[in-house]
Image (cartoon, grey):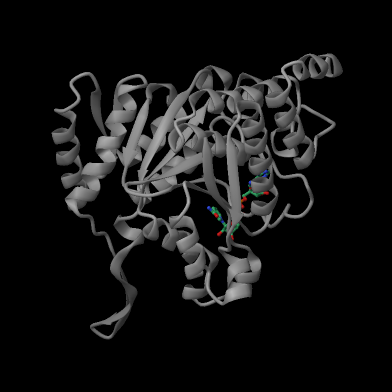
Amino acid sequence: MEKRIVVLPGDGIGKEVTKGAVEVLQAVGERFGHQFHFTYGSIGGEAIDTYGTPLPDETIQHCKDSDAVLLGAVGGPKWDTQPPHLRPERGLLKIRKELNLYANLRPTSYYDSLAENSPLKKEYIENVDLLFVRELTGGLYFGKPSERVEKDGKEAVVDTLYYQKSEMQRVIKLAFELAEKRDQKVTSVDKANVLESSRMWREVANEISEQFPNVELEHMLVDNAAMQLVTNPKRFDVIVTENMFGDILSDEASVLTGSLGMSASASLSEDGPSLYEPIHGSAPDIAGQNIANPLAAILSAAMMLRLSFGMQEEAKAVETAVNQVLDAGYRTKDIGRSVNNYVSTSEMINEVKAMILDHEAIMHIMEAYS
Ligand SMILES: NC(=O)c1ccc[n+]([C@@H]2O[C@H](COP(=O)([O-])OP(=O)(O)OC[C@H]3O[C@@H](n4cnc5c(N)ncnc54)[C@H](O)[C@@H]3O)[C@@H](O)[C@H]2O)c1
């Protein structure tokens, strides 16, 4: 197969980790006989510096003409004092709208070899396997007006939570479709005791659930969900929720099993290329030091193989390689609570590649760490 992939490294460690994902995809191409063509685009702070905008039109067109997009991360202190339209994060929001990336998928998977990195005791976290499905292009982050106002002579502010019913329907339906192939359970999270938008969300979830008789639906208030995620994460299979609740809860879920540096995501488009990115930011505190964990970006590439290209075996090969490298004891600093000699970003990338290309490599690594 031939596929065109646009890479948007962005800022800080975005550059370092996307390099790893690209090299791993090249290794997959070599092993399975695919041709992946990579081209690069500009986004975030580096786009502001070069083009005066966080998302140049050229980048948007480039992405629209591709089969999938791989993003690193954007942002950094250099641009923190810029006016809102010149903030790197604006580039992220805009690309989501431009590519119609309506659903953000974030899996939280348990790695036995990383159990001690979890903030929870092993008995709570063991075998957790949950999938967040977050609505990504509506709600409070996109509603207008969003501005400072003056009312009755007082300084005030307004943000708008706006959803079309169809926006709720498509993301909730996706959650049910995904649950059908997993443990057949959807938890729909809302704040229906307070918000009208949540009451519509709940109605839509009930309507969609009638099309999926094999999938159990439960409703949960967002405050309860935040609590249950840390007290009983094993109870969840697929969690679906609106944009802002999903933003907060999926970050909470992502650290359950270890580090931000392990958490991958996919943002699916309804009608065009989808976008894959690690959930972490540009990590300015460690950028340029070759110590960032590249595994979240590499696992995001595995999601691309599975969800955009239908390459199940190839995706599995990447995930297995990551597991094997971790089992063999390789750790970057963020996941190395019990290890004294950390590997660098590039060493970690090389080990994953070697594992994909050479099954014998695992034996060599096992010996080295025994
Ligand atoms: N999707 C994105 O592009 C995105 C997401 C979140 C934050 N940001 C931006 O990133 C910048 C920094 O934000 P932040 O510090 O709040 O969040 P961050 O995710 O960049 O970093 C939080 C902490 O986690 C560590 N970390 C993150 N990824 C890591 C990795 N792969 N390996 C090892 N350690 C890792 C960092 O060193 C830092 O200590 C800000 O400008 C923010 O707006 C961008």
- In the image, 358: left or right of 281? right
Q: Is residue 304 above or below residue 198?
A: above
Q: Residue at x 54, y 28 (%)?
A: 315
Please tell me which residue lies in front, 161 or 45: 45
Q: Position of residue 257 (x, y in %)?
A: 56, 29
- In the image, 163: left or right of 31? left
Q: Position of residue 359 (x, y in %)?
A: 72, 17
Q: Position of residue 229 (x, y in %)?
A: 43, 32
Q: How many marks?
A: 0
Please tell me which residue lies in front, 156 or 32: 32
Q: Residue at x 22, y 18 (%)?
A: 214
Q: Position of residue 275 (x, y in %)?
A: 47, 48
* Residue at the outermost bottom position: 153
Image quarter (top left, top right, bottom left or bottom right) of the C terminus: top right
Q: Residue at x 57, y 19 (%)?
A: 122
Please tell me which residue lies in front, 33 or 340: 33
Q: Residue at x 32, y 26 (%)?
A: 179
- In the image, 293: left or right of 121? right
Q: Is residue 65 above or below residue 351?
A: below
Can residue 45 be seen here? The reply is: yes
Please tell me which residue lies in front, 328 or 361: 361
Can residue 116 be seen here? The reply is: no
